[in-house]
Amino acid sequence: MDDDLTLERRSGLPDALRTLLESYPRPTWETHPEFEGLVRFWLDRHLMFRKLGTLLREDAEATIDGKMPPEAQRARLARYGTMLVNELHGHHQIEDHHYFPALSGLEPTLIRGFTLLDRDHEAMDGLLDRFASGANDVIGGKSEVGPFREQLLAFDSLLDRHLVDEEDLIVPVILKHGAGRMQ
């Protein structure tokens, strides 16, 4: 796969992987009959990941600005950081082992896209490991929150790139074929 399509380098999906998105643009998703159920649930999970990242970044910034005591930030980081890591790992496992193979079978022309998303998950494993290590250093008092905030900004950016691309590829497939065909 093209090195320019790695999670760290790309700015979106290539046009060849956006063909269904043209037929099922984002503004129409919520009104589509196949939106309720799996698509809504799946997008809500993505929203949760984004909210957790934002919460952790805002907590770090509040601590840096003296608006949140460091011990409160560390406690919240332990709780919500663990939630983010665990939920993302579980989410990716389900996608890799169930959703991606099922969706690839429904849209074989997009297999390259599912391979790309699978490679993202491998990259995300490293990001999550670095996130956990940085979080543990802050929680354990081995590192200041300022450098961790910078790490969070980079993490959030890559996570959002992955989530947007995943949504742009997967949601149109489900809307076209229906969640029932993924069994």
Image (spheres, helix red, strand yellow):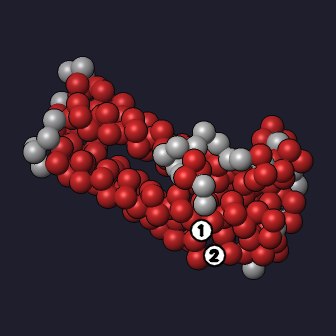
**For mark 1, what is the residue?**
95
| Image coordinates for residue 34, horizontal then vertical, percent | 84, 58
Q: Is residue 82 left or right of residue 33?
A: left
Number of residue marks: 2
| Image coordinates for residue 111, horizontal then vertical, percent | 72, 67
Residue displayed at 14% across by 41% down: 143
Q: Quadrant of residue 171?
A: bottom right
Residue type at mark 1 is Glu
Local SS, label 1: helix
Query: Could you tell me if the residues under marks 1 and 2 are in contact, i.e. CB atoms within 8 Å?
Result: yes
Q: Is residue 111 visible?
A: yes
Residue type at mark 2 is His
Q: Report, in whole angstroms, how far the alpha carbon at label 1 lies from the one at label 2.
A: 5 Å
The one nearer the camera, 71 or 104, is 104
Residue displayed at 87% across by 60% down: 176
Q: Residues within 10 Å of mark 2 (few under 14, many from 20)?
A: few
Query: Which corner quadrant holds the C terminus?
Result: bottom right
**For mark 2, what is the residue?**
98
The one nearer the camera, 178 or 170, is 170
Q: Would you place residue 169 above or below residue 55 in this image?
A: below
Residue displayed at 80% across by 60% down: 173
Local SS, label 2: helix
Query: Which corner quadrant holds the N terminus?
Result: bottom right
Q: Is residue 82 left or right of residue 98?
A: left
| Image coordinates for residue 137, horizontal then vertical, percent | 17, 48
Residue displayed at 84% across by 50% down: 19
The one nearer the camera, 47 or 156, is 156
Residue placed furthest toward the front: 2
| Image coordinates for residue 175, horizontal then vertical, percent | 83, 57
